[in-house]
Image (cartoon, helix red, strand yellow):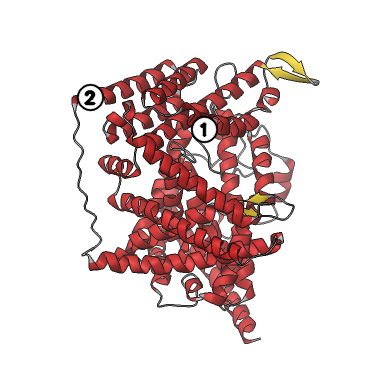
Amino acid sequence: MHIPDGYLSPSTCAVLYAGAAAGWYSALKRLKRALLNRVIPLISVFAAFSFVVMMFNLPLPGGTTGHALGVTVAAIVLGPAGATLALSIAIAIQALFFGDGGISTLGANCFNMAIVGSLVAYVVYRLIAARAALTSRRRVVAAAIAGYLAVNAAALLAAIEFGIQPIFFHDASGTPLYAPYRLSVAIPAMMIGHLTFAGIAEAVIAAGVVAYLQVADPGLLRATSGLAQDASLESTELRPAAHSLRRLWIAIAVLMLLTPLGILAAGTAWGKWSPAQSPHAANRAPAVSAPVPMVPQGLQRLSKLWTAPFPAYAPAFVRSHSFGYLLSAVFGVGILLCLSLLAQSMVERYRRRGSSA
Amino acid sequence: MSGFLESTGMGFARAITQAMLSEKTARRRGLLQSLDPRVRVVGLFSLVLAVTLARRFAVVAALFAIAVLLALCSRVNLLTLVKRVWLVVLAFTGVIALPAIFVTPGRAIAAAGGVNITEQGLRTAALLVLRVETAVTFTTLLVLCTPWTEVLKALRALHLPKEAITMLAMTYRYVFLLVETTTQMFESRRSRRVGVLPAAEQRRMAARTAGVLLSKSMEMSNEVYLAMQSRGFRGEVNALSEFRMTMWDYAGLLAFLLTGGLAAWMGK
């Protein structure tokens, strides 16, 4: 899955370097806040561990062999921020000191495997393992599924990066200048190998290591288990979560206050036409009305099915258009909050019933 | 039959041999070795960039010729490049590029087995293989002609964050320590084993080895941290910069940048 130099265009590489740099910056900031001076030795040694694990030549079912990435183990032990940095350092060592991978594609490789790979592994593991006991079998299954999906997510991204090359980068005669296959070929070609072998290799290592740690060193699983509050690594994940929640509230409040800006926009948003808003109307901009030559019959028929309580984002009893917009935003956010609180209480009740059984 | 222990052990041996070969080549007296490491890093990176920017086959071929010339002038054994880069890339990228000859839409110039070979297909396959060969040759030249400590110092001069460079340096150091630890674990396991283990058991062994290695690594990171603290580490990384640019280095840098710039311009 390591993309070598020459497969991706310089602009693709630049975009993915920028994406990776944002990931590295936020991961380093997050870890430094929680671990202070411990970041450097912890990440360095873990990166070395990831590098060595990547060299394990695993025998797979069917008589073939495969290499694991080690991203899932890193995400389970260190959390996504630590895993991002450790894997990125391991990938950089491979490229810079062993000539394995690429220099122009280092950002792409880190973005696919270290950033997206760790995020997918972490989220899937946390979702499936939920609050199961550290020694629960469920954690082993969660690690296996997380590993399988993380590797396949990274492979899918690489396939998309390959697949867009001939669309955007070709010469006047139509000759592709970089990876030559379109998405319809690149995605199946890349995914077959990862769905069948590489994903399994990662699942085997992730599940095996979690099963081993459950017996030999369960403390290493605690940091991302969602069970402990005091472990230093746990705070890496929880503290920023609290911060981001506060930031989320502020962002929602700002967005609600800015909602009246919507009325400044001219015309109707693309695709949000009501049957009455004929595309032939003279006052509509050509770019907005272009795609629909006539009102579709289905739209005409279905338009009577549901009438919104606040049509056009403003209740009928409010005179001021801006205030109506603001009121609609507050009301909409309120509904969403109620629904999410309801869902959360249902999940909690289900969990409590599960743990008491 | 080569099992998990044997094949992984061979991989470790190959990595260590490669690293040792790099150290050996880097000590030779050659063109690249005579330049300041910062010039080598910036120069070869700019040539890699020029290879990826160039859109003409002839320009990429010229850059490949420059790579071969640089290897010869830097006393890099061409056989090493053949075995380590050119054949490996040809096998890997060649297999990937081959179907493009047939499936790329364009002007048919020949037919093979009832399938048309297109001009555009041939050109894209050849360009891809040559581009990857050239870029990987430049990267390998950097790896072969520059000791890792100098690569790190050069990266520092390029204003990469100190934390990142320290982590790269420590990781490189601990890779070899962990490889050694794992090799010892493998040796110990092999000395107690009779016959060939079934694949499922080998997988379990691999996972257990990774688990033990993980516990050891975490323990080691704590010890390393304590050792760093006891030596006064407070999160600040300071390093000496001993490089001094000479006229020769400036001339080398200019030559690299001119070649890269010219290639990128001509390859538009």
Q: Chain of mark 1?
A: B
Rendering coords of residue A112 (x, y %): 52, 47
Q: Residue at x 55, y 57 (%)?
A: A120
Answer with the quarter of the image where residue A19 lies.
Answer: top left
Q: In the shown orientation, is residue B178 left or right of residue A62?
A: left
Quadrant of image for the N terminus of chain A? top right
Above or below residue A324? Residue A284 is above
Q: Residue at x 46, y 53 (%)?
A: A87
Rendering coords of residue A333 (x, y %): 49, 63
Above or below residue B260? Residue A181 is below
Q: Which residue is mark 2?
A: B248
Rendering coords of residue A40 (x, y %): 33, 59
Answer with the quarter of the image where residue B190 lies.
Answer: bottom right
Mark 1 or mark 2: name the one nearer the start of the chain: 1
Q: Chain of mark 2?
A: B
Residue closer to the observer: A88 or A351: A88
Question: Which mark is drawn over residue A276?
Answer: none
Residue closer to the observer: B180 or A278: B180
Residue closer to the observer: B137 or B186: B186
- Dot 2 surroundings within 10 Å: few (below 14), some, or many (20 or more)? few
Q: Which residue is mark 1?
A: B85
Above or below residue A1? Residue B108 is above
Distance between mark 1 and mark 2 Cα atoms: 29 Å
State whether residue A200 appears in this view: yes
Q: In terms of secondary structure, where does tag 2 sit?
A: helix
Q: Amino acid at mark 2?
A: Trp
Q: Amino acid at mark 1?
A: Val
Q: Residue at x 51, y 49 (%)?
A: B13
Q: How many marks?
A: 2
